[in-house]
Amino acid sequence: MGVGTVDTVMQTTQNDIFLRACRRQAVPRTPLWFMRQAGRYLPEYRAVRSQHDFLTMVRTPELAARVTVQPVEILGVDAAILFSDIMVVPEAMGMILHMVEGKGPVLPEPIRTRAHVEALPHPDPESALGYVMGAIRQTRGALDGRVPLIGFSGAPWTLAAYMVEGHGSKTFRRAKAMVYGEAALAHALLGRVADAVGDYLLAQAAAGAQALQIFDTWGGLLPAPEFAEFSLAYIARVVSRLREANVPVIVFCKDCAHSLEAIADTGCDVIGIDWGTDLAEARRRVGARCALQGNLDPAVLFAPPEVAARHSVDVLERFGRGEGHIFNLGHGILPETPVASVRAMIAAVADESPRYHD
């Protein structure tokens, strides 16, 4: 199917079980999608990527839409997630961004002073990030109502950590040093980033995104008190802004099992659960406040297909009977993951999950 435009107000979704599960409504089976599902494990993605660099794909709506739709057509997942990158927000805020092969994002002029923070412009998402909105519109046209489209952004803390550090890091020591030693400066930066993220996600919903996920990849670097002050407070600020969009909001905070109840307090509809967190325990603690998404260990998919299938059913069993579960990996799918094991995971969930629903 070709990529085109769509009237996102009038279009209905043929398979809406993901959206219903987000709202803890009854579904005939557990819906499934997975993080980074448009990516390097798929030969079809690699064929496109061999002709274009990563940022060109992100910034070209037709290319972004093409690879976003691939997992829907090839694997039959229950939702598409937009092909993009969280680092487009710092770039839209005036920072220089490079994607270095084997290293990831590099910001050669990081934020280190109050003057740097105060110089950051507040981006208009339709102009500074218009290519993302174009990709959403084109993807909705290509999907033609088959499944919902998820938009996303990095959480304010995760984005600010990159902006201060200047690159990826195992420790983000400069960002954490700002939290501990220059808290007022950290709050000033986080406030600006949160406002930009809120506007960005609202624009995604207006362009046609039917659910929104906030990724706090580096939330687990902060102890619970600092996580509450420097991450969750700003996630809650964004979630509050998104009420007017009237779409489900998913919050995924990696390595943050210490704060599941506090994550629910942000007002999100769904909490993403990483693979290191027990899903049954998460359900007990969160109760009926939010749906849960997760949480198969991505490394399981390197095992033979029958093993991947068995572990997928284990995830269903850990959540148990009832509504409000979206099957997903506990983090993004890894490059070189065997597609046969991915298919086995999807088939196992499709075949076995109906017995967990009335």
Image (cartoon, rainbow, N blue to C red):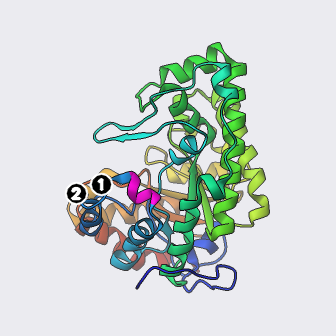
**Which corner quadrant holds the N terminus?**
bottom left
Front-lying residue, 314 or 244: 244
Was residue 56 drawn as part of the magenta stretch in this picture?
A: yes
| Residue wearing tag 2 | 303
Residue 249's place in the image compared with 17, above or below, is above
Q: Quadrant of residue 234?
A: top right
| Residue wearing tag 1 | 300
Residue 121's place in the image compared with 265, above or below, is above
Task: List x then y, in percent, for residue 6.
Answer: 59, 82
Q: Quadrant of residue 17?
A: bottom right
Residue 265's place in the image compared with 319, above or below, is above
Amino acid at circle 1: Val
Q: How many marks?
A: 2
Range of magenta residues: 55-59
Is disc 2 placed on a helix, strand or loop?
loop
Residue at 57% x, 73% y is: 137
Give the spatial CA distance, label 1 vs label 2.
6 Å
